[in-house]
Image (spheres, rainbow, N blue to C red):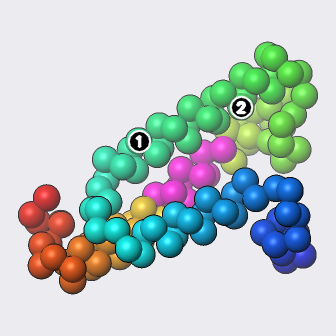
Amino acid sequence: MHDKIIFDCFKDITNYDHSVPLIIMLIEYCINNVPFLWLHWVTIALVQYSYILFQWFYSVNIEHKLTYDFMDWYNHPLTAMGIGCSSLVISFVFVICLISINNCKVRAATGIDPSKDL
């Protein structure tokens, strides 16, 4: 797994679809003072769930083959839905961290407590 991550992030110069946007967003996050609110997570969750449904529809009804090998929509649809929905749990934990860090960052930069004042 470690070798795959190294290959995907550094050696595969034709495919920076995930690493470059992530790096740019992390750099931007360090310098912005825009509060991150729970409404943002609701929007993210809706987009994630829409992608899961689109991926199911595309795999089963249009392409008739699996997009991801580990999400078998034909033989184990509930397991595939569970795997897809696990991204919602991961993003929820990530958002808790982002909101906590963001509240500290905004409070330090502006003196405003986003959890109370916004």
87 within the magenta span: yes
Q: Residue furthest left?
A: 117
Task: For the N terminus, give its image quadrant.
Answer: bottom right
User: Helix or strand or loop: what does disc 2 sit on?
Assistant: helix
For the point 34% across and 68% down, the residue is 32
Identified by mark 1, the residue type is Thr
Q: Nearer the viewer, residue 87 or 80?
A: 87
Magenta-colored span: 84-92
Image position of 56 with respect to 15: above or below = above
Q: Nearer the viewer, residue 24 or 52?
A: 24
Q: First in sequence: mark 1 or mark 2?
A: 1
Does residue 75 appear in the picture of this structure? Answer: no
Spatial separation of the CA atoms under disc 1 and disc 2: 18 Å
Location of residue 7 in the rendering, given as x and y in whole percent from the top left corner: 88, 70
Mostly what secondary structure, the magenta segment? helix
User: Helix or strand or loop: what does disc 1 sit on?
Assistant: helix
Identified by mark 2, the residue type is Gln
37 within the magenta span: no
For the point 66% across and 44% down, the residue is 84
Does residue 32 appear in the picture of this structure? Answer: yes
Asked whether the beta carbons under mark 1 and mark 2 sit within 8 Å of each other, the answer is no
Image position of 52 with respect to 88: above or below = above
Image-quadrant location for residue 8: bottom right
Q: Which residue is mark 2?
A: 55
Q: Residues within 10 Å of mark 1 (few under 14, many from 20)?
A: few
Image-quadrant location for residue 110: bottom left
Q: Is residue 7 left or right of residue 80?
A: right
Q: Which residue is mark 1?
A: 43
For the point 51% across and 70% down, the residue is 26
Location of residue 78 in the rendering, given as x and y in whole percent from the top left corner: 71, 36
Location of residue 117 in the rendering, given as x and y in whole percent from the top left corner: 9, 63
